Image (cartoon, rainbow, N blue to C red):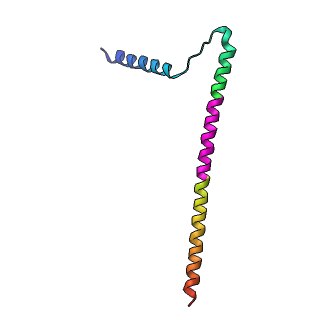
Amino acid sequence: MPKSEACWGCLRSLIMIEQEMYERFECAPGLKLQAHERVTQIHQENMAKRMDQLEKLMERMERRLWLTVYGVVAVILAQAIQSVLAVAP
């Protein structure tokens, strides 16, 4: 089998696998509005999932930021206390 036929075979199998991954729905001329509404619903669901992921990411970054701020404040206070203790007899 020539190399190009093998590539086309792989491509066809990938297309078939990809088609199986997506949910099928009818799209006849009379059903265009329903198809458009379904696609819009899918887009909105995906956007909501992405927004949730972004919110979780922002919360984690905010926690890291506050942890860093508290760490810096703790180091400054530790140095201040250490210098006070060094001066006191």
Judge whether residue 25 is colored magenta. Answer: no
Q: Quadrant of residue 79?
A: bottom right
Residue sitting nearer the eye, 72 or 8: 72
Residue reaching furthest to the left: 1
Q: Quadrant of residue 45?
A: top right
Measured as percent of width and height from the top left, residue 34 is found at: 68, 16
- Considering the image in quadrants, where does the N terminus appear? top left
Q: Is residue 51 above or below residue 83?
A: above
Residue sitting nearer the eye, 66 or 9: 66
Q: Is residue 13 above or below residue 88?
A: above
Q: Is residue 8 above or below residue 57?
A: above
The residues colored magenta run: 44-61
Write the residue at 61% across / 59% down.
66
Q: Quadrant of residue 71?
A: bottom right
**Left or right of 37 in this view: 72:** left
Measured as percent of width and height from the top left, residue 4 is found at: 36, 17
Task: Label the magenta part by its dominant secondary structure.
Answer: helix
